[in-house]
Amino acid sequence: MDRHEMEKKLHKALDKERFRHTMGVMYTAASLAMAHGCDMDAALLAGLLHDCAKCIPNDKKLELCKKHHIEITDAEERSPFLLHAKLGAFWARKKYEVTDEQVLHAIAVHTTGAPGMGVLDKILYIADYIEPNRKKAPDLGTVRQMAFTDLDRTMLLILEGTLSYLEEGKGEIDLRTAETYEYFKQQVMQGKET
């Protein structure tokens, strides 16, 4: 299935705001890919499909993950909206015929992050945060600038903000997000030492 067909299919599957966000992420991911020497087509595809399972009701997300043997953490069980990333990777393969494992992995980890993320993983995670339709994230101007020069520091800054937001009682902290924060803190510290 080509990208144009996928866009048409997604336009029907997502609500208006989610589709607009998706297009913003797709183009932002492509821009970041150009800046960081990553495959632009892979970035476009990951950006386009990253939220392909987002508009599925939460109880249905849980049901589909169980049916298709997709691992569910305790935090995801309590906050099933988090499952749209893992389910989205499954959906991208099944419904949109994506076979590129890097694209599928980037989609799967774009919500919680993961230690050892590759360049495409980081690009998608960051693009989801900084795309032009986002307005309320803390330090957005700084994060947007930094994204084009240092992916690891950008990841750390976003993760710090995310954990801070969640610690204020605005949501549950997924263990994977905390592990990802610790991983990038270590990466940035090692980078300072060299």
Image (cartoon, rainbow, N blue to C red):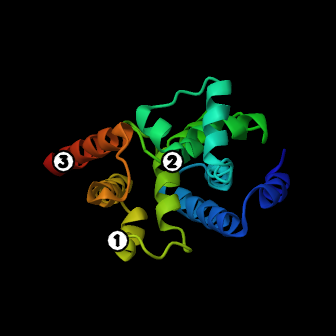
Depth order, front residue of 6/178: 178
Which-is-in-front pick, marks 3 and 2?
2
Towards the viewer: 68 or 35: 68
Q: Amino acid at mark 1?
A: Pro
Q: Which mark is residue 138?
A: 1
Q: Decide: is 1 above or below 13.
A: above
Residue 121 image point, x, y percent: 50, 45
Q: Residue at x 54, y 48 (%)?
A: 81
Image quadrant where residue 94 sits: top right
Question: Residue at 62% of width from left, 27% of height from top?
Answer: 66
Residue 173, how many percent across, how many down?
34, 46
Tag 2: Cα neighbours inside 10 Å, few (<14), some, or many (≥20)? many
Query: Front-most of 84 and 59?
Result: 59
At mark 2, the secondary structure is loop
Q: Is residue 82 visible?
A: yes
Give amino acid for label 2. Answer: His
For residue 5, side relative to residue 17 (left or right)? right
Q: Quadrant of residue 34?
A: bottom right
- The residue carrying mark 3 is 189
Could you tell me the amino acid type at mark 3?
Met
Tell me the tag on residue 110: 2
* 186 in relation to 66, above or below: below
Question: Which marked residue is nearer to the observer: mark 3 or mark 1?
Answer: 1
Report helix, strand or loop for mark 3.
helix
Q: Quadrant of the N terminus?
A: top right
Are the two marked residues, 3 and 2, in contact with CB atoms closer than 8 angstroms? no
Seen at 53% across and 43% down, the residue is 80
Residue at the image point whose x is 35% and y is 57% from the top: 162
Q: In the rendered view, would you say 99 is above or below 24?
A: above
The mark nearer the N terminus, 1 or 2, is: 2
